[in-house]
Image (cartoon, rainbow, N blue to C red):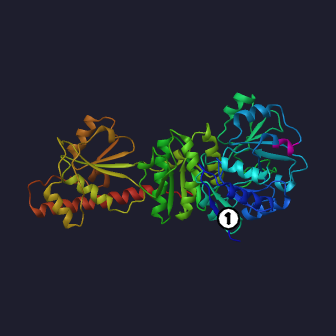
């Protein structure tokens, strides 16, 4: 089967294309189309055989219900046995829009559409292309997400084509969707009404209109044996090809943990993806890093979630590590989808970060123009089991200066070039419990401990590696003495790397 793809201009909708798509639906065929949430895979909701085609095209279990989409409120009475009084108020506020309501079905709706249940899920989408298609197709169109079952939902027509090209008759390309996560599902067959799937319409929004609303506490459970009343409740959904792991904790702690895990996995040869935010993306240094949006506007996170997961599929990463988000507002829907995509695989950030004592190593000399930058450059070349921010600082730096010319020549002789290096003074801001400070001489160590009582762990480099010889300044001395200083620093740095790696290995853990 060759799938027809029709691009639709939202500002000038081609009715001929809509009628062509509607005719396909009336004849029992399948048409993918945009909604404000995700792209849907449309079929005649009142045709049992069309439902079978939908399940087959998606590879979807047949006990996973399909949502019926309507374009007019009056069409609701054609497919349900009763309409509770509260529906009018709810519809006035949230239809058309990203809300699905569950009713008792009538005999017009085949069991194939409802996954064998006596209830039916109904939504009126806000997307104009969707509503025109529904009317052209007969008024009642079933439409699960237009993707291979279990994969991230499609938010563009290209996502649909990637999964279903050759399996369905037509795709209407209306561009990117607006919301990016599926609709909220509200069960009206129970009292009080119950949210079965979170979405853009939140519990708080519904309660302002309908009074008390309960939430199905099994939403995030992967062990329920009950038949699903709504899509996405029973099976693993929204999943990328890679293993997805959520790292929970305060944002700063989660960033540290993800950096730590990513460094380890990349060191072991794995291709790693990181789901970051606009606020955190610059803090990551390892792996393939993508921003999902801004924590200041979590609607952007929802809109980009599936797109980012699919991009990582294209890049064939082995593992994806994601920051977690507050479960409030649309964040509840984001975490619901992330949790299902990850198979509820969650790591606590604090359990990871406690496995690494130091995250920053600072070498300190008098003026930061020779010994300390040489030590920092040498440590950066060592194979380290954990990632560290490696810095050099001076006790007395009145203004930024380049590297000592003799030191620069010495490093070049050993194939090391420090690009755009400038000296920096030691600053209390970089000191702390996760920082290891290594001075060249005892006098520098004592001065730091005197001036910064809360500096944390401060040693001379030789002391820390079990070599009590100080690394004295060779300023103004011979080339041979500079070379001897270099060799002493190198010897100590090699021992430092060995000690750091031994300590890391003792706490080593596979983060999968």
Q: Can residue 354 be seen in this view?
A: no
Give the quarter of the figure containing the N terminus.
bottom right
- Residue nearer the viewer, 301 or 3: 3
In the picture, measured across the screen, residue 330 lies left or right of residue 214, that is left
Name the residue: 84% across, 39% down.
Answer: 189
Q: Which stretch appears magenta?
A: 75-80
Q: Residue furthest right?
A: 107
x and y percentages locating residue 377 in the rendered image: 27, 58
Q: For residue 243: magenta?
A: no
- Give how far across and how far down residue 150 sits, in percent: 68, 58
Count of numbered badges drawn on the protein: 1
Quadrant of the snapshot with the C terminus:
bottom right
Residue shown at 76% from the left, 61% from the top: 24
Residue extending farthest to the bottom is 1
Q: Name the quadrant containing residue 88.
A: top right
Residue 373, percent from left and from top? 24, 54
Q: Where is residue 242 in the image (x, y as percent from the top left)?
A: 58, 61
Q: Nearer the viewer, residue 441 or 137?
A: 137
Task: Please tell me in which quadrant of the rendered image residue 15 appears.
Answer: bottom right
Q: In this view, does 472 lie to the left or right of 53?
A: left
Residue 448 placement, left or right of 134: left
Secondary element under disc 1, as helix, strand or loop, is: helix
Q: Mark 1 sits on what residue?
A: 164
The kind of secondary structure the magenta stretch mainly shows is helix
Which of the two residues, 452 or 90, is positioned nearer the viewer here? Answer: 90
Q: In which quarter of the image is residue 14?
A: bottom right
Q: Does the magenta stretch include residue 78?
A: yes
Residue at image location 27% in from the left, 38% down from the top:
449
Q: Answer whether residue 424 is visible to the viewer in this image.
A: yes
Callout 1: 10 Å neighbours few (<14), some, many (20+)? many
């Amino acid at each position: 089967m060759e799938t027809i793809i029709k691009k639709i201009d939202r500002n000038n909708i081609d009715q001929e294309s809509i009628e062509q798509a509607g005719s396909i639906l009336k004849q029992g065929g399948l048409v993918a189309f945009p909604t404000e949430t995700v792209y849907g895979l449309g079929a005649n909701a009142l045709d049992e055989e069309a439902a079978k085609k939908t399940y087959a095209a998606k590879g979807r279990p047949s006990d996973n219900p399909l949502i019926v989409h309507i374009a007019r409120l009056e069409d609701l009475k054609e497919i349900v046995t009763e309409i509770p009084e509260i529906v009018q108020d709810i519809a006035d506020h949230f239809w058309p829009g990203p809300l699905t309501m569950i009713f008792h079905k009538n005999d017009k709706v085949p069991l194939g559409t409802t996954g064998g249940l006596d209830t039916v899920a109904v939504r009126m989408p806000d997307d104009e292309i969707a509503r025109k298609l529904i009317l052209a197709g007969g008024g009642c169109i079933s439409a699960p997400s237009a993707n291979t079952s279990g994969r991230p939902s499609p938010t563009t027509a290209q996502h649909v084509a990637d999964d279903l090209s050759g399996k369905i008759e037509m795709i209407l390309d209306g561009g990117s969707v607006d919301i990016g996560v599926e609709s909220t599902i509200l069960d009206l067959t129970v009292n009080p009404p119950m949210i079965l799937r979170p979405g853009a319409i939140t519990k708080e929004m519904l309660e302002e209109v309908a009074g008390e609303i309960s939430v199905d506490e099994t939403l995030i459970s992967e062990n329920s044996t009950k038949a699903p009343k709504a899509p996405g409740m029973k099976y693993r959904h929204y999943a990328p090809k890679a293993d997805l792991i959520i790292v929970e904790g305060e944002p700063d702690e989660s960033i540290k943990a993800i950096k730590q895990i990513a460094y380890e996995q990349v060191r072991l040869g794995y291709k790693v993806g990181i789901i970051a935010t606009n606020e955190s993306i610059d803090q990551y240094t390892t792996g393939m890093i993508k921003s999902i949006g801004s924590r200041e506007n979590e609607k952007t996170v929802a809109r980009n979630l599936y797109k980012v997961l699919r991009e990582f599929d294209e890049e064939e990463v082995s593992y994806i590590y994601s920051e977690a988000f507050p479960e409030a507002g649309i964040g509840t829907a984001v975490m619901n989808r992330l949790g299902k995509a990850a198979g509820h695989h969650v790591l606590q950030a604090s359990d990871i970060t406690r496995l690494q004592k130091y995250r920053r190593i600072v070498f300190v000399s008098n003026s930061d123009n020779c010994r300390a930058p040489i030590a920092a450059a040498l440590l950066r070349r060592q194979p380290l089991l954990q990632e560290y921010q490696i810095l050099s600082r001076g006790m007395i730096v009145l203004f930024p200066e380049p590297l000592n010319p003799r030191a620069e020549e010495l490093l070049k002789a050993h194939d090391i070039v420090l690009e755009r290096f400038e000296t920096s003074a030691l600053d209390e801001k970089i000191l702390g419990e996760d920082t290891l400070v290594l001075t060249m001489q005892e006098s520098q160590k004592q001065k730091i401990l005197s001036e910064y009582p809360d500096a944390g762990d401060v040693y001379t480099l030789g002391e820390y590696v079990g070599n009590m010889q100080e690394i004295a300044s060779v300023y103004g001395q011979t080339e041979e003495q500079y070379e001897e200083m270099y060799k002493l620093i190198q010897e100590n740095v090699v021992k430092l790397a060995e000690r750091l790696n031994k300590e890391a290995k003792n706490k080593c853990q596979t983060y999968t």
